[in-house]
Image (cartoon, helix red, strand yellow):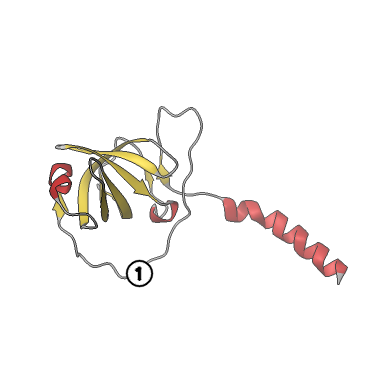
Amino acid sequence: MKKHAAILAVVMLASAPVFAAQQGGFVDPSAPAAQTQAAAGQGGFSADHTSVVTVKQAEEMKDDSWVTVRGKLEKQIGNEDYLFRDQTGTMKVEIDHKHWNGQTISPKDNVELTGELDKDFNSIEMDVKQVKKLP
């Protein structure tokens, strides 16, 4: 039994780097170290349940509204927090590692983000559930 436990422990330690391999995410060209993000996600049903709005329009919408915005991710400002910019302004967005779906995005890339607005008294943030790199 101890032999099986030891073998299992060795296999788990040896396979950990394989599972820890990261794919996709935001790549900041000015960052000193390489950045990696979440592993590729899985497919599923996708419905067009939101309309594309601007940052300025999103600022006027109600808390918990589902929106889609198009623009660029300018920079990473936290572990899962990014600064998003479109032609009308900027907004903080939170993108969980699992929502990158293996895509690598840089500040030069146009993206479409879909998610839920989180509004406080004087700030707005978007909890992103889907990231699409646009051509």
Q: Nearer the viewer, residue 16 or 118?
A: 118
Q: Secondary structure at mark 1?
A: loop
Nearer-the-camera pick, 102 or 54: 54
Residue 96 screen position, x and y as percent: 41, 52
Q: Residues within 10 Å of mark 1 (few under 14, many from 20)?
A: few
Where 74 sits versus 127, above or below?
A: above
Please tell me in which quadrant of the rendered image residue 54 appears: top left
Q: Position of residue 41 (x, y in %)?
A: 43, 60
Q: Is residue 3 left or right of residue 85?
A: right
Near-viewer residue (49 or 64): 64
Q: Residue at x 42, y 64 (%)?
A: 42
- Judging depth in this view, the residue of 123 and 112 nearest the camera is 123
Where residue 13 appears, as percent x and y from the top left, is 71, 55
Residue 80 to residue 43: above or below: above
Where is residue 60? Give x, y as percent: 13, 47
Most extreme residue toward the right is: 2
Q: Number of numbered discs present?
A: 1
Q: Mark 1: which amino acid?
A: Gly
Q: Quadrant of the N terminus?
A: bottom right
Q: Is residue 88 left or right of residue 104?
A: left
Dividing the picture into quadrants, the one containing residue 64 is bottom left
Residue bearing mark 1: 44
Where is residue 3, by image quadrant? bottom right
Residue at position x 81%, y 66% in the image:
5
